[in-house]
Amino acid sequence: METMNNTANGNHPIDVDNLFNRTQKEDNRNKGLMKGVFVLYLICTILYAVMLLFNPDPDLTLTDRLGGMCYVAAFLVGTIYFRREYLIYKTLDYTLPLMQLLEQTEKRYRFYSRKWFPVIVVVSLIDIGISISMTGQTHLWAQSPLHKFLIIQGIYWMFVFASGFVGYLIWRKRSRPIWRDAKALLSELKD
């Protein structure tokens, strides 16, 4: 086993072989997850397109169809995003030189990156779709459209932020150690 002198948290040397074993295991888990979510989003894209856009039912109002367009657009963006992420994990090459492999690993496992832009688009489009669909409903609990809109936004974003926090906790437990070790080794190799 190859061990580098640099330490990720200041108290132990980083075992390169162990790092890449952990990385491969996490990459395989993420590949399966991305494939599953891709299939789910593809199914939702088709279902919502049929139910809310191409459905000839005269009871579907314009607001239902506009909200449906937002859902379909959100699921379509999600489908493309998760397909791309799946292909990234599927085509990983662990035979690359160490420096290049560490750069890819550090980039793949960092928390803040451009990869979140499509996720923000999906969350925003779903928010717009829910707002259009629910605010236009006359039988809901609130008196004014503004009151409905504010309640919908509060509930929706509470769930989004709670989900984001859970995602962060999962990243912190599973991915951050890999990211931190890859970043420390990369820093050492560049020095």
Image (cartoon, rainbow, N blue to C red):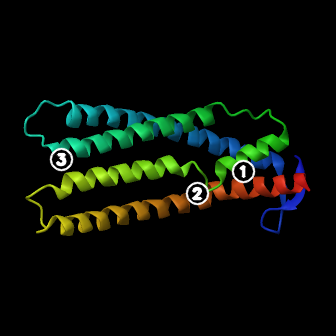
Q: Is residue 55 left or right of residue 114?
A: left
Q: Secondary structure at mark 3?
A: helix
Of the two numbered discs 3 and 1 in the rendering, the one whose residue sits closer to the viewer: 3
Vertical relation: 124 (above or below) 49 = below
- What is the distance, in whole Å, between disc 3 and disc 1 at their CAs? 44 Å
Vertical relation: 173 (above or below) 26 = below
On residue 35, the disc is none
Viewer-proximal residue, 190 or 176? 190
Q: Earlier in the sequence, mark 1 or mark 2?
A: 1
Q: Secondary structure at mark 1?
A: helix
Residue occupying the point 31% across, 31% down: 46
> What percent of the width, then of the height, locates residue 33?
51, 41
Q: Quadrant of residue 187?
A: bottom right
Give the amino acid type for the residue marked by disc 1 in the picture.
Answer: Glu
Q: Quadrant of residue 88?
A: top right
- Residues under numbered marks 1 and 2 in contact, where contact means CB atoms less than 8 Å apart: no
Viewer-proximal residue, 134 or 35? 134
Tally the numbered discs.
3
- What is the distance, in whole Å, between disc 3 and disc 2 at their CAs? 38 Å
Q: Return the residue at label 2.
A: 171
Viewer-proximal residue, 51 or 21? 51
> What percent of the width, then of the height, locates residue 89?
62, 36
Q: Is residue 93 left or right of residue 166?
A: right
Give the amino acid type for the residue marked by disc 3 in the picture.
Answer: Thr
Residue 106 appears anywhere in the view: yes
Give the amino acid type for the residue marked by disc 2 in the picture.
Answer: Trp
Q: Return the residue at label 3.
A: 63
On residue 106, the disc is 1
- What is the distance, in whole Å, between disc 1 and disc 2 at their CAs? 13 Å
Q: Quadrant of residue 29?
A: top right
Vertical relation: 73 (above or below) 5 = above
